[in-house]
Image (tube, rainbow, N blue to C red):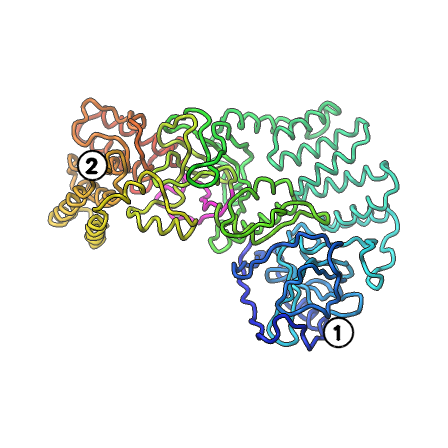
């Protein structure tokens, strides 16, 4: 779990900014105060992990220079409220870390005995730098020296995880006064230390020890088993890129190499690279067909490849397996019906690779990142922390994530590249990408449509393919969620090569109100067909006035009343008719008329309460029509509701309210003795509900029932 912590940095006096502080606490004073915090205030085990909340005004780029290309300066040359571009520091931890708040704080000293505080944020929990052990030596690249509230209180602040590097004890860049004597002298000593750390479940330390063991090893034969141990440990940490590299490095040409291919296959599976995983697992089976677990992993991989090719999912079983503790489904992504290309609307877009009929799957995508965190106060920071960890631990993910739009933040162009043994990770860039591309997601869209569960808490996740969908107020697809699976279905017939669209947020009836949202959240004015034609209408101001009167008239009435007064209904009908006449036929011929939906829905429920089924038919049909679907308003004898999705090319907007209106039409026809027509509307409602929830479901108990 993760929760954001807003740091309101103390404001340094103007005369101190850029200057070297005149007063400094001694190492003894710093350590004494620090140790009192370590003893009293360590974060309790199991407590939510806190994440530093970034302030856009404080944004600065990650260092793109090697520590070996920087001027190394002593701590006494650090200047207040300054980013020391072109410079670096090399320091040793002179205290155990205080791991609390949103980062880890250590007292550090340089080669001259100067001491200061070092605060490291945004390190993955898998990193040993998430709490630097006492005695370790680190390099900080282009450090930021932050004022912390008084003349004597400053801290070296590291926001980007790649700006601090853990140095090997034998690294020649370490100044002589900071060097320790050989901590351990042989590869076997380091390997044993790694084994001990592993048994204590201190996996990040185990990886560090195995890495030292490999450096001390004298030949490939000695290195091979250590590579295997490090690969197995990194597999537990989810560092899949490293697992693949170490597994392949551990091969000796013997039949025992099956274990190397097995671990590499499992790591590729963890990266959702199922074709690569299949290749490695096939080699493992070829070397040892009886090895425990290999056949099971191979069969699991084949199932994912089948899903990728055919989009064949058991959605009911997926739904049944979900729980707040189990949101990550073991499924592959079905994307072959779509492709990414440049869009005339905004940057890249998603396009249909073949004809797709209304109601069919467009694609299904497994989340790139989705924390199991449905608490609104923690959902965003949990996603941010997960993105940092995954991109730091698995650099191969950078090639897809960093293609995404970050807003106004300026890139260096070097993000994601390896430098000093780690990928450059810019946390401000990642936060920009998160803000512009993440989705708010329920545990299950199907559950979210039920009255009892409506408004349940949402997590936040990233789906890289889905994020390429551009917005339209009249989209041709609708998204839904099952755990970490994003399901997209067509809401109308789509032609090969046609761009695919979704709504970014629930569409507001008035063009000015909805575009205010798009501009403030994403920085664009919508140019969809509906917004384009509505901008040409001279009657907008009058429609807005009448729509406001209708909203007040409807809201004034107690919606809990079963029977609405005649006078109230007549007033709503009168205002509705006025508003309907303000929609120019030449403009709204095949477009939704969004301002009419609310009063029409109100009238459906009012006449349903009075069991006036003819009026339920009248206004129910208008609800569906006002959402942009082609439905007759009067003569239906020659029309089959099942054809609703096969109508001429229009610009519909699918929501749960369309499904509810279709159910009301089915009920009204049933009451009037029109059994075939009722059955037709019921079938149409089932198709609509499949679009809303992502798969075929029982429509009983949905919202507005």
Q: Quadrant of residue 291?
A: top right
Whether 189 is drawn above or below 20: the answer is above
**Label 1: which secondary element:** helix
Q: Residues within 10 Å of mark 1 (few under 14, many from 20)?
A: few
The residue to which callout 2 is attached is 585
Q: Quadrant of residue 178?
A: bottom right
Going by the image, does 667 lie left or right of 481? left
Residue nearest the observer in this picture, 322 or 105: 105
Is 458 one of the magenta-colored residues?
yes
Q: Residues within 10 Å of mark 2 (few under 14, many from 20)?
A: few
Q: Position of residue 251 (x, y in %)?
A: 79, 32
Residue nearest the observer in this picture, 84 or 30: 84
Q: Residue at x 41, y 30 (%)?
A: 498
Q: Which residues are magenta?
A: 438-462
Residue nearest the observer in this picture, 170 or 695: 170
Is 531 one of the magenta-colored residues?
no
**Residue 195 seen:** no
Gap between marks 1 and 2 measured at Cα: 82 Å
The residue to which callout 1 is attached is 28
Q: Position of residue 682 (x, y in %)?
A: 29, 29
């Amino acid at each position: 779990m993760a929760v954001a912590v807003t740091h309101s940095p103390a404001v340094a006096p103007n005369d101190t900014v850029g200057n070297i502080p005149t007063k400094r606490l001694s190492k003894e004073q710093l350590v004494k105060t620090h140790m009192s915090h370590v003893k009293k205030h360590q974060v309790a085990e199991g407590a939510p992990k806190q994440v530093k909340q970034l302030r856009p005004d404080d944004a600065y780029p990650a260092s793109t220079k090697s520590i070996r290309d920087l001027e190394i300066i002593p701590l006494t040359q650090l200047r207040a409220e300054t980013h020391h571009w072109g410079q670096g520091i090399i320091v040793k931890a002179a205290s155990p870390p205080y791991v609390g708040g949103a980062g880890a704080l250590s007292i550090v000293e340089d080669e001259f005995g100067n001491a200061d505080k070092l605060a490291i944020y945004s390190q993955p929990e898998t990193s040993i730098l998430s709490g630097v052990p006492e005695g370790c030596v680190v390099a900080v690249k282009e450090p930021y020296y932050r004022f912390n509230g008084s003349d004597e209180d400053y801290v070296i602040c590291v926001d980007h995880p790649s700006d601090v590097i853990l140095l090997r004890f034998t690294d020649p860049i370490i100044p002589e006064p900071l060097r320790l004597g050989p901590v351990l002298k042989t590869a076997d000593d380091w390997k044993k230390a790694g084994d001990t750390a592993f048994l204590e479940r201190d996996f990040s330390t185990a990886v560090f020890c195995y890495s030292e063991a490999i450096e001390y090893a004298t030949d490939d034969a000695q290195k091979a088993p250590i590579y295997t141990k490090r690969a197995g440990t990194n597999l537990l940490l989810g560092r899949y890129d490293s697992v693949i590299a170490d597994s392949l490095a551990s091969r000796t040409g013997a039949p025992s190499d099956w274990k190397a291919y097995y671990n590499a296959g499992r790591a590729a599976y963890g990266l959702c690279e199922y074709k690569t995983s299949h290749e490695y697992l096939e080699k493992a089976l070829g070397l040892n067909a009886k090895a425990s677990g290999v056949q099971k992993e191979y069969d699991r991989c084949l199932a994912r490849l089948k899903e990728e090719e055919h989009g064949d999912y058991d959605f009911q079983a997926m739904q049944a397996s979900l729980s707040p503790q189990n949101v990550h489904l073991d499924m592959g992504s079905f994307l072959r019906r779509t492709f990414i290309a440049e869009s005339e609307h905004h940057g890249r877009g998603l396009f249909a690779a073949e004809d797709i009929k209304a109601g069919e799957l467009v694609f299904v995508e497994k989340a790139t990142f989705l924390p199991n965190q449905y608490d609104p106060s923690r959902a965003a920071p949990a996603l941010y922390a997960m993105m940092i960890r995954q991109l730091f631990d698995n650099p191969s993910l950078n090639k897809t994530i960093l293609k995404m739009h970050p807003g106004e933040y300026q890139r260096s162009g070097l993000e994601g590249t390896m430098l000093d043994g780690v990928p450059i990770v810019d946390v401000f860039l990642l936060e920009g990408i998160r803000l512009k591309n993440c989705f708010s997601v329920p545990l299950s869209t199907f559950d979210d449509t039920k009255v009892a569960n409506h408004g349940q808490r949402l997590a936040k996740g990233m789906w890289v393919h889905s994020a390429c969908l551009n917005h339209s107020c009249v989209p041709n697809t609708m998204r839904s969620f099952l755990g970490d699976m994003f399901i997209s279905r067509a809401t109308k017939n789509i032609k090969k090569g046609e761009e695919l669209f979704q709504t970014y947020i629930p569409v507001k009836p008035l063009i000015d109100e909805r575009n205010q949202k798009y501009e403030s959240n994403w920085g664009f004015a919508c140019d969809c067909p509906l917004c384009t034609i509505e901008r040409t209408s001279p009657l907008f101001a009058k429609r807005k006035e009448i729509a406001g009167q209708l909203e007040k008239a409807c809201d004034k009435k107690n919606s809990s009343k079963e029977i609405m007064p005649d006078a109230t209904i007549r007033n709503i009908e009168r205002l509705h008719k006025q508003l309907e006449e303000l929609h120019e036929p030449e403009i709204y011929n095949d477009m939704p008329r969004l301002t009419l939906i609310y009063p029409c829905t109100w009238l459906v429920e009012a006449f349903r309460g009075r069991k006036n089924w003819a009026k339920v038919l009248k206004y129910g049909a208008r609800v569906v029509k006002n959402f942009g679907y082609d439905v007759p308003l009067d003569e239906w004898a020659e029309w089959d509701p099942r054809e609703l999705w096969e109508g001429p090319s229009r610009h519909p907007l699918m929501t749960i309210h369309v499904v509810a209106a279709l159910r009301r039409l089915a009920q009204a026809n049933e009451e009037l003795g029109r059994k075939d027509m009722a059955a037709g509307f019921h079938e149409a409602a089932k198709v609509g509900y499949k679009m809303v929830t992502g798969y075929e479901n029982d429509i009983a108990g949905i919202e507005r029932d």
